[in-house]
Image (tube, rainbow, N blue to C red):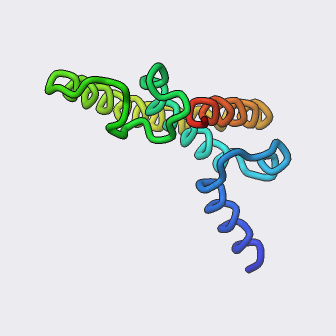
């Protein structure tokens, strides 16, 4: 029972953690690491297109970007959002089964890299 509770705590903690250490990640299974990796990929997919405007802005979909508001601009931003969603879904679908074949240490290095990149994009 204790093991089950510990696993549940780790699984739910993965989603809420901002940046984790190498040692905390090494206690996770490859599937847990894969889910965390895909989560970081998704964050990057939504943040990266807006980096020229939003370095330091946590929520890239807010309306306070320094971009003029017009029907054409809103349409283009919505198209970028749709493409980011499609990219995230494609990556999750395709990578979910491939990532676990990688070495665990390489998955951890990739997660740490993505977390650092996402933190640099979304912090002031």
Q: Position of residue 100 (x, y in %)?
A: 65, 38
Residue occupying the far left of the picture: 71
- Which residue is located at x 66 percent, y 60 percent? 13
Q: Position of residue 3 (x, y in %)?
A: 76, 72
**Residue 112 versus residue 71 in the image, above or below:** below
- Which residue is located at x 22 percent, y 28 percent? 69
Residue occupying the far bottom of the picture: 1
**Residue 38 versus residue 45 in the image, above or below:** below
- Residue 77 shown left or right of residue 105 in the figure: left
Residue in the foreground of this view, choosing between 103 and 52: 52
**Residue 75 versus residue 10 in the image, above or below:** above
The total of numbered circles placed on residues is: 0
- Residue 51 shown left or right of residue 12 in the figure: left
Quadrant where the image shows the C terminus: top right
Residue in the foreground of this view, choosing between 122 and 37: 122
Residue in the foreground of this view, choosing between 75 and 71: 71
- Which residue is located at x 72 percent, y 35 percent? 112
- Which residue is located at x 37 percent, y 30 percent? 65
Q: Position of residue 119 (x, y in %)?
A: 63, 36
- Residue 106 shown left or right of residue 85 in the figure: right
User: Which quadrant of the figure has residue 36?
Assistant: top right
User: Which quadrant of the figure has residue 39?
Assistant: top right
Quadrant where the image shows the N terminus: bottom right
């Amino acid at each position: 029972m204790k093991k089950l509770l510990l696993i549940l705590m780790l699984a739910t903690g993965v989603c809420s953690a901002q940046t984790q250490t190498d040692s905390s990640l090494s206690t996770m299974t490859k599937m847990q690491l894969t889910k965390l990796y895909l989560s970081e990929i998704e964050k990057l997919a939504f943040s990266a297109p807006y980096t020229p405007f939003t370095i330091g802005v946590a929520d890239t979909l807010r309306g306070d970007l320094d971009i003029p508001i017009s029907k054409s601009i809103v349409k283009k931003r919505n198209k970028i959002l749709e493409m980011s969603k499609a990219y995230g879904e494609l990556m999750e679908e395709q990578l979910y089964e491939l990532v676990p074949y990688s070495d665990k240490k390489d998955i951890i290095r990739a997660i740490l890299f993505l977390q650092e990149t996402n933190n640099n994009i979304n912090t002031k």
